[in-house]
Image (cartoon, rainbow, N blue to C red):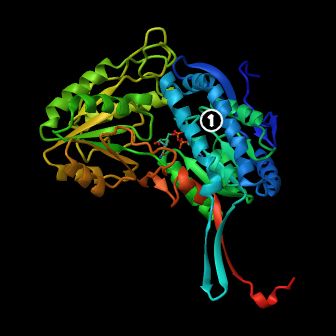
């Protein structure tokens, strides 16, 4: 048996050891030390959660929305109280800096706050006298048991893009977190248990592909929320749809940013360095291609290279560290391979983050900030999601050419422009093919009260996560047409 703890599932209000004999190590990417082991739960454990969810649903859907949200208020208070502890868990299993971990937990809590408005958000609408004496109403009802499958890069935040809306609207919810970062969910569920949600309303099943497939095929589970890479998003969307489920599947990205010559270069560089290298480039909204227009080429190239070369890399809990490691040794190898590929394809490696070590953390999976210059627009590297701290530079002469490059890609998660000219900004906002647009913003992450958009191969589905899209996704509409002639009434 492993020395480190084996994580448990939370089913029907109780902690259970998985019956699986297969476990994977959970590793601190800064030290390469094993922190825990995660079980790969078999289908029978998904079934136990689905059955418990269905049972709980009968009472939970009848619990008035103002009463349901009281549990979310408690959960919010508990998350605030344990924010520091949770942030340390996120940094240790995921590698990002402490400040980045605090930031993602805050973003998660904001979704709970928005979902606490469900008594208003869930309202339907009505018309009297659609025909003489006949009224029509639209009401929203929960679906039943729903599930979310989440990625490694935001262990605390992404489950909270879905969970609060699902349960506030009256559904029962199952989470399958990333097997690479399951510890934040383990602690989150201890707090969920403390908040007192009735058994079966919120459940946790650890695992990987086999567990996911059992969720996708389970007849009780009505809807799937997924965030992860594009190939898996596409697979999940297809299999969920074949099984008659609703699905919202957020995929990968390759986010272009246009730098106009009139942009304030000091601010632009600071924001761009954070966007490209923050969270070690492992954000689905990381800037990965910077397209300079005209005279921005020289100033931006010089300043971003300086910012990349001087960024402080290390263990995310150490003071002063600005960037942590990437998630696994395989990730490091893949990213370094893609940098080499970029060089082979004709890019010049202006700042090279390969083969570097951090003192005291020699075993960590560190890739330092890297800048590839003159990346050919049709090269593979220009279109491949690197998901590491690598910024590719391309240079054009006009905004027209820049927009063409922005739109010549299969992903559509985010596109940004840096400029001091309103007309350029408006045109970009109007013409860029991406679901999240930033104007003088490096990470255009929508607040919880806006849907997290995403176009092209960055998203499969219609209704996105967060805000009123979340409310619509987790409810089905029922339309009622009523006739109550006065002469039918008993007179008192
Ligand atoms: P991933 O696709 O490898 O894994 C995501 C989830 O899917 C995990 O829970 C994993 O267990 C499961 N999974 C993996 N392979 C599977 C398979 N073959 N069948 C069934 N389930 C499977 O993604 P990741 O590496 O954890 O996360 C990084 C990716 O997520 C990047 O591509 C990033 O762009 C994307 N992402 C997108 C958004 C967004 O909002 N669009 C946000 C965050 C991350």
Q: Locate residue 8 relative to residue 333 in the image: left or right.
A: right
Place of residue 322 in the rendered image (x, y in percent of width and height, measured from the top left) = 41, 21
Numbered marks: total: 1
Residue appearing at x 24%, y 36% in the figure = 393
Which sits in the foreground, 366 or 22? 366
Place of residue 371 in the rendered image (x, y in percent of width and height, measured from the top left) = 28, 29
Q: Is residue 378 above or below residue 290?
A: below
Q: Is residue 260 above or below residue 94?
A: below
Q: Residues within 10 Å of mark 1 (few under 14, many from 20)?
A: many
Which sits in the foreground, 266 or 454? 266
Place of residue 364 in the rendered image (x, y in percent of width and height, measured from the top left) = 49, 18
Q: Quadrant of the N terminus?
A: top right
Which sits in the foreground, 254 or 136? 136
Whether residue 334 can be seen here: yes
Q: Is mark 1 within 8 Å of ligand 1?
A: yes
Residue appearing at x 30%, y 53% in the figure = 429
Which sits in the foreground, 232 or 245? 245
Q: Residue furthest bottom?
A: 487
Q: Quadrant of residue 248?
A: bottom right
Q: Quadrant of residue 421?
A: top left
**Residue located beneath label 1 in the image:** 179
Whether residue 245 can be seen here: no
Q: Locate residue 328 relative to residue 205 in the image: left or right.
A: left
Q: Secondary structure at mark 1?
A: loop
Q: Locate residue 373 relative to residue 205 in the image: left or right.
A: left
């Amino acid at each position: 048996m492993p020395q480190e703890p084996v994580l448990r599932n939370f089913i029907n209000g109780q902690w259970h050891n998985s019956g699986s004999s297969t476990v994977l190590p959970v590793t601190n990417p800064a030290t390469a030390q094993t922190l825990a082991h995660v079980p790969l739960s078999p289908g029978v454990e998904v079934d136990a959660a689905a059955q418990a969810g269905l049972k709980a649903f009968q009472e939970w859907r009848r619990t008035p929305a103002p009463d349901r949200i009281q549990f979310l208020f408690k959960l919010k208070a508990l998350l605030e109280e344990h924010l520091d502890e949770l942030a340390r868990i996120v940094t240790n299993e995921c590698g990002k800096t402490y400040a980045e971990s605090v930031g993602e937990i805050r973003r998660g809590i904001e979704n709970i706050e928005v979902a606490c408005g469900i008594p208003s958000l869930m309202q339907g609408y009505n018309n009297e006298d659609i025909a003489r004496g006949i009224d029509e109403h639209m009401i929203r009802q929960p679906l039943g048991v729903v599930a979310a499958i989440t990625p490694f890069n935001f262990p605390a935040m992404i489950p909270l893009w879905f969970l609060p809306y699902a349960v506030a609207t009256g559904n029962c919810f199952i989470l399958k977190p990333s097997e690479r970062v399951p510890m934040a969910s383990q602690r989150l569920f201890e707090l969920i248990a403390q908040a007192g949600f009735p058994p079966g309303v919120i459940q946790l099943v650890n695992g990987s592909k086999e567990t996911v497939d059992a969720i996708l095929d389970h007849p009780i589970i009505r809807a799937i929320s997924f965030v992860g890479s594009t190939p898996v998003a596409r697979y999940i969307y297809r299999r969920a749809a074949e099984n008659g489920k609703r699905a919202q599947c957020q995929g990968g990205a390759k986010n272009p940013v246009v730098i106009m010559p009139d942009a304030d270069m000091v601010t632009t560089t600071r924001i761009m360095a954070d966007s490209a290298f923050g969270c070690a480039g492992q954000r689905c909204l990381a800037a990965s291609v910077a397209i300079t227009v005209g005279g921005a080429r020289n100033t931006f190239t010089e300043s971003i290279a300086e910012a990349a070369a001087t960024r402080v890399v290390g263990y995310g809990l150490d003071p002063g560290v600005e960037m942590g490691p990437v998630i696994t040794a395989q990730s490091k190898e893949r990213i370094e391979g893609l940098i080499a590929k970029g060089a082979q394809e004709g890019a010049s490696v202006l700042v090279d983050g390969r083969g570097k070590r951090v003192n005291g953390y020699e075993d960590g999976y560190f890739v330092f900030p890297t800048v590839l210059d003159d990346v050919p627009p049709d090269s593979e590297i220009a279109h491949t999601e690197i998901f590491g701290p690598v910024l590719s530079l391309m240079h054009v002469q006009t905004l027209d050419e820049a927009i063409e490059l922005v739109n010549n890609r299969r992903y559509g998660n985010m596109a940004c422009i840096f400029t001091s000219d309103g007309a350029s900004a408006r045109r970009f906002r109007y013409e860029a093919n991406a679901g999240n647009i930033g104007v003088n913003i490096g990470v255009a992450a929508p607040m919880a009260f806006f849907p997290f958009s995403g176009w092209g191969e960055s998203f499969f589905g219609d209704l996105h996560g967060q805000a009123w899209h979340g409310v619509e996704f987790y409810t089905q509409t029922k339309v009622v047409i009523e006739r109550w002639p006065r002469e039918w009434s008993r007179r008192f």
